[in-house]
Image: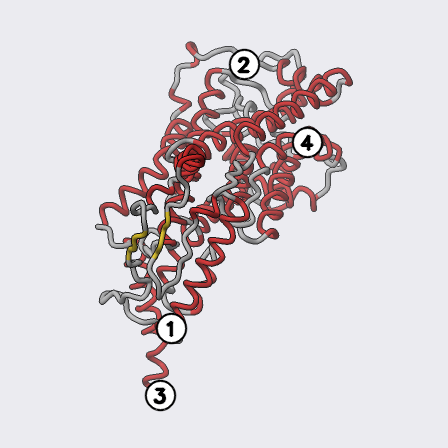
Amino acid sequence: MTLSLVARPFIFLYQLLSRIFWSGLNKKPIWRLILNFWIGFSTVFIWLLIFKNAGLIPHSIRPPIHVKLPVIMDHYMFSNMVGSVFMILCLSSFSYLLFVKYYRPNNCQNLTKYLPILNKRESIEIREESISSESSNSSDLEDHFGLDSFALDSTTSTIEPLSFIEPEDHVPPLEFFRTLSEAEITQRESETNAKIIDHLRATHSYQPRNCWYFAPPLLFFLSWGILNIDYWFKDPINTQKDLLAWFSYVICHITVPIVTAVWLYVFHAPGAVKLYGLTLGIQNICGVLTHLVFPNAPPWFVHMYGENKEANYEMPGYAAGLIRVDIALGTHLHSKGFHASPIVFGAIPSLHSAMAVMTFFFVSYYARWTAVKVASFLFVVIQWWATIYLDHHWRVDLLIGLSYALFWFTIVKNVRFGLNRVDEQFIKSRLRFDFAHGSTMGMRVFRNTRLQKFFDPLA
């Protein structure tokens, strides 16, 4: 009896690891898993490779470094009255046009006519009801939503749904977790599919539930005000603010994208994390290439040497406000790290801004819980403040970093293989009871237990 109790945690650990392994494969060979990982994050690795080897470029062929230009741009766009009004008008107009063109949901009034009424115990019935006068509307609707994949014939046909209950021999039951009965699983999936149908009827869109589809253009519209508020809070300087800025600028800059990638993989549709990795890497590649062909001096350089000092590539990097953190923590880590940076004059764009914003875009798009979305937005606001407070970036750098993220997120959302396609395939797979393509990593790990629902974004 005692031996059995002692062994149970180890049995559970073995079962959990086994489920994680097989759930990660998801009925695919292991080489496909490795290939998908490298494809998804290949652009991130390319960006890091370019950044790390930027110092190998001969200084003689590199372009001149702009010192006054970012100072003038920042002052005109954020501190000059005429420039500020011009910026607000431009941001307002562009945000509105962006929302109308790429982010406003498309309302298809006749969607409910084509939605199947699904039940685990029933077959899927699709009736083609519109003919003659409504044929053109039907065609447009099917083209937009891909409902032709649900349609069977011109009268009434049926398909047996794939089972969510079918056992897999290599996936052991979990210790400490009761396996649900077939009736319980059937009821749960019927309830979930009813929610999916209600969501499609209400939104006429495959977008996730509680999706902040308006977040990218809204953040762009609010950016001028947020950046000025952050700028006002850069003074006074004290140790508490130093540590907060360091935690956001250094620790969160590294950990938040990693946590977001894991969260997308575990909690959301297959393919979402791959698009996150690709988009993050592409925007960063564009950013670092901009640093190389259009170098600009950061604020610390101007504050240390003045606007008229000519910058050159022999100058070492400088940790600026992070030196105070080194003093407070009793280390030289940041001073040495920035001193050896291969790109010293990479103020425009701010990749700290671009990465934080891109993360917010994906979180605001996918997260079910509003609190998570708000936390991601606050991270952007704090990250912008930290870069200004630590004297590493101008406000214009952060706005341009936001623009890079906005540009690439808009593309990945609307391109044929992008987010819209991922969401569409995920929901269609669920309506067909195709567990392999209609489940998240967390759902597969805790399959047929009560915890499966926690990892289901559609539940």
Left or right, residue 425 beside residue 356: left
Q: Earlier in the sequence, mark 4 or mark 2?
A: 2
Cα separation between marks 2 and 1: 69 Å
On residue 183, the disc is 1
The residue at the point 42 percent across, 32 percent down is 136
Circle 3 residues within 10 Å: few <14, some 14–19, many ≥20: few
Q: Closer to the camera: disc 1 or disc 4?
A: 1
Between residue 452 and residue 235, name the one nearer to us. 452
Q: Earlier in the sequence, mark 3 or mark 1?
A: 3
| Type of amino acid under label 2 | Ile
Circle 1 residues within 10 Å: few <14, some 14–19, many ≥20: few
Q: Earlier in the sequence, mark 4 or mark 3?
A: 3
The residue at the point 65 percent across, 30 percent down is 221
Disc 2: which residue: 65
Q: Position of residue 74 (x, y in %)?
A: 67, 20
Disc 3: which residue: 2
Left or right, residue 202 beside residue 5: right
Residue 350 falls in image quadrant: top right
Disc 4: which residue: 227
Q: Position of residue 122 (x, y in %)?
A: 35, 63
Between residue 358 and residue 437, name the one nearer to us. 437
**In the depicted structure, whether residue 138 falls above or below residue 160:** above
Q: Position of residue 119 (x, y in %)?
A: 39, 62
| Type of amino acid under label 3 | Thr
Cα separation between marks 4 and 2: 25 Å
Picture quarter with the N terminus: bottom left
| Type of amino acid under label 1 | Ala
At numbered mark 4, what does the secondary structure look like: helix, strand or loop? helix
